[in-house]
Image (cartoon, helix red, strand yellow):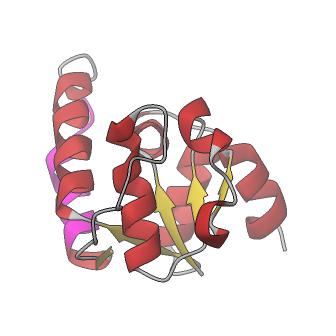
C-alpha cells in the first residue's frame, strides 16, 4: 500500500510515540510504502532540523536519509490550479496523484477538507492505524 505523509505526521512519528510512530514502524517493517517528492523532503528536513534542536537525543539526519533511500521518490506534476486553502499543502496532493497513490495521512484541516479530490482519501493518523494497520 502506497501512502503520502504530511510533514506533521512524519515529524511526529520521528520525535514522539502514538499513531504517527506506528505508521513509520509499519513502513520500516515493509508493510507500507511511503511516497515523497523533493519538495516534501525539503519541508521534512526544515521542520525536523528545527525540532531536533529541542530533542538533542534524537538523530534526525540518519532517519531522513533512510527515508530518502527507501521511500519512493515521485516527480510530481504541478496541479493546474490550487486545491487546498493553503496552497503549500498542494505538494502532498501532487505527490499522491503523480505516484498513483490514493491515500494521504494528515491531521491538517486544509488537506482533510479536500479528501476525495481525484479519488485521493485524506485521513487522520489514528484512522489509518485503526483501519489499515490493525488488519
The residue drawn where x is 69% and y is 60% is 116
- Quadrant placement of the C terminus: bottom right
- Residue furthest toward the front? 81
The quarter of the picture where residue 38 lies is bottom left
The residue drawn where x is 57% and y is 45% is 106
Is residue 61 magenta-colored? yes
The correct choice, above or below, for 44 with respect to 54 in the image is below
The secondary structure that most of the magenta stretch takes on is: helix
Residue closer to the observer: 46 or 14: 46
In the image, residue 14 lies at what x, y percent? 39, 43
The residue drawn where x is 41% and y is 32% is 86
The correct choice, above or below, for 3 with respect to 114 in the image is below
Residue closer to the observer: 120 or 105: 120
Residue 94 falls left or right of residue 122: left
- Quadrant placement of the N terminus: bottom right
Q: What range is drawn magenta here?
A: 56-68
Residue 11 falls left or right of residue 22: left
Is residue 109 magenta-colored? no
In the image, residue 72 lies at what x, y percent? 32, 79
Total residue callouts: 0
The quarter of the picture where residue 69 lies is bottom left
The residue drawn where x is 24% and y is 32% is 47
- Residue furthest toward the top? 54
Residue 40 falls left or right of residue 2: left
Amino acid at each position: 500500500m502506497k501512502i503520502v505523509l504530511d510533514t506533521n505526521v512524519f515529524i511526529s512519528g520521528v520525535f514522539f510515540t502514538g499513531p504517527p510512530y506506528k505508521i513509520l514502524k509499519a513502513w520500516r517493517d515493509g508493510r507500507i510504502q511511503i511516497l515523497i517528492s523533493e519538495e516534501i523532503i525539503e519541508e521534512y528536513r526544515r521542520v525536523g532540523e528545527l525540532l531536533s534542536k529541542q530533542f538533542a537525543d534524537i538523530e534526525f539526519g540518519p532517519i531522513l536519509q533512510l527515508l530518502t533511500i527507501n521511500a519512493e521518490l515521485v516527480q510530481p506534476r504541478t496541479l493546474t490550479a490550487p486545491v487546498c486553502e493553503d496552497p503549500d499543502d498542494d505538494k502532498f496532493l501532487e505527490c499522491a496523484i503523480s505516484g498513483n497513490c490514493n491515500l494521504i495521512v494528515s491531521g491538517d484541516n486544509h488537506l482533510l477538507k479536500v479528501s476525495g479530490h481525484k479519488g485521493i482519501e485524506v485521513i487522520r493518523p489514528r484512522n489509518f492505524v485503526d483501519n489499515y494497520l490493525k488488519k
